[in-house]
Amino acid sequence: MSVAEKIETEGGRDFVRDIIADDLAKGRHKQIVTRFPPEPNGYLHIGHAKSICLNFGAAAEFGGRCHLRFDDTNPTREEQEYIDSIQRDVRWLGFDWGEHLYYASDYFEQLYRWAEHLIEHGLAYVDDQNPAKMRAARGTLTEPGRNSPYRDRTVSENLDLFRRMRAGEFPNGARVLRARIDMAAGNMNLRDPALYRILHAEHPRTGTAWSIYPTYDFAHGQSDAIEGITHSICTLEFEDHRPLYDWFIEHLPVPSRPRQYEFARLNLAYTVMSKRFLKSLVDEGRVSGWDDPRMPTIAGLRRRGIPPEAVREFVRRVGVARANSTVDLAIFESAVRDVLNRTAPRRMAVLRPLKLVIENYPEGEAEEVEAQNSPEDAAAGSRRLPFGRELYIERDDFLEDPPKNFYRLGPGREVRLRYAYFVTCREAVKNAAGEVVELRCTYDPQTRGGNAPDGRRVRGTIHWVSAAGGVPAEIRLYNPLFTRPDPGAGGDLMAALNPDSLEVLSGAVVEPSMVENNADETVQFERQGYFCRDRDSAPGHLVFNRTIGLRDSWTKARA
Ligand code: ATP
Ligand code: MG
């Protein structure tokens, strides 16, 4: 990180907030107004979360307001499902637009009138060239473009054609309304960009009222101006569009003059954020849906058990700067762990069970032991766990021939069963294939609660679930969706998909309290990681997603 970037991101302050603070201090605005402007053509992803936290967060911090505006100018890709999911996801992240919910389509009539205004002032014309011709005449970064043969049409001819475009007289793609700026401009965006296209398509909100739709570039800045947006914050790829947006604002009788500021978009290692690609994963069935817990979507993160606070904390740690970069997954994961470590209640679950029978525990008897909900926070209270003669422990907490530094179970070794007793392994029972299928143990009744009155110590403490009281569960473990940190580098994204991104453990056992656990409460299964109940759960069939493991297994494993 350069010094300049450090200054930009330090102390929760960044260059955008500095600009806002300065504008307020100098009296340029009494109140700031920002907006988050998604196109409803897919679900929101973690990259959008950065923009949401910046726009809504800065507005809240400076006593302003933030609008939610759907940039719904392309009816062929937009759906109500996306509109609904976007609102749900922004709310879930903890933000509220109050009554300020808008749609670019609300402004279609006004935008149309402004297009006519440009025509009337000789600043726009209808072009009849086909798309290929138009592209060819655009020139390159080093060569100027060529003027269209239709560029000098009269105002009245342009008005007539544009009105007939609106009336639906021409087929898709037959004509385009273009701004009349400069085909030799160094900035390609100023080479007579398209303002309106003919598109006979039904729009989710305006239905079949329109046969022409404004381009994103023509709609975006004017929508900001209509809403009185003071700080139009967007990602860096729009920097080159700013001169065009400013040109529109200059030549149109708009009610306000927004200023645009660009910041670096969020890129995350092992992650792809293109909505088009995410949609193809859904459409091709590579994932179970937009909310598949492996997806970088907000809906996927939520289903995986990541709390909204962790997403906000991650975004805060990443900061807002002007240099593009890719953020390490470890930064995301540490934010998630830090939040969950503080907030997630502790529970017990055995993911890969091995039966343990306590031979000297009276048959037919049972008891309950007291377990803390949080090791650091006594106020989180405790719960009672059933304990009895037959238990399950984790398969890899036993080794037949353990090395010296293995502090769990082995033949003749003693360990503490968390919150319960000391047990000693007497025998490992095997099946015909030679696999250990059961441990025969004895327990020391004097060690109830997990301490020996004689001061005797054990090095290991393991978790367990009572065989009689435990509840069977399916556990889903997730790994990154891609095998490479930069999945886009090789070109073929589908080929970079990780075949082992989902691992299902069907025979897990969880403590009985998990039957009542809510889907939106992520818990820590002691020694295993953080988990939350999946919505695939049904009575008698519990399913849990692993939100994240306890430790950063990454940096080492993948280095
Ligand atoms: P696509 O994925 O289809 O290219 P998009 O992600 O840009 O599109 P929009 O709906 O246009 O989708 O995005 C809404 C807002 O979110 C825009 O202001 C955009 O700048 C911002 N945004 C999108 N992706 C990111 C990202 N990775 N990091 C930060 N902001 C983002
Ligand atoms: Mg976009």
Image (cartoon, rainbow, N blue to C red):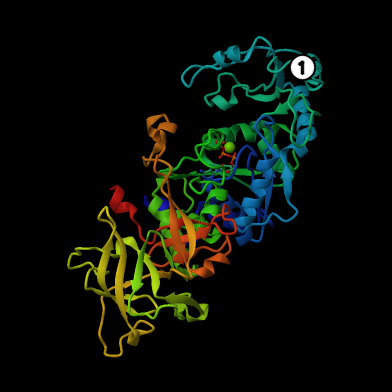
Q: Is residue 41 above or below residue 383?
A: above
Q: Amino acid at mark 1?
A: Asn
Left or right of residue 107: residue 488: left
User: Does 465 sit above or below residue 137?
Assistant: below
Tell me if I can see residue 230 in this picture: no
Q: Looking at the image, which residue sits at the far top?
A: 149
288 and 485: which is toward the camera: 288
Dot 1 corresponds to which residue? 158
Q: Quadrant of residue 248?
A: top right
Residue, x 57% and y 33% (percent of image)? Answer: 241
- Pointer 1 residue Cβ closer than 8 Å to ligand 2: no
On the image, the x and y values in percent for residue 163 come to: 81, 20
How far across and how far down the image is residue 30, in percent? 69, 57
Q: Is any atom of residue 14 visible in this view?
A: yes
User: Could you tell whether 449 is left or right of 43 in the image?
Assistant: left
- Residue drawn at x 37%, y 31% is 490
Measured along the vertical axis of the image, is residue 503 above or below residue 542? above
Query: 228 or 52: which is nearer to us?
Result: 52
Q: Residues within 10 Å of mark 1 (few under 14, many from 20)?
A: many
The local secondary structure at tag 1 comes to helix
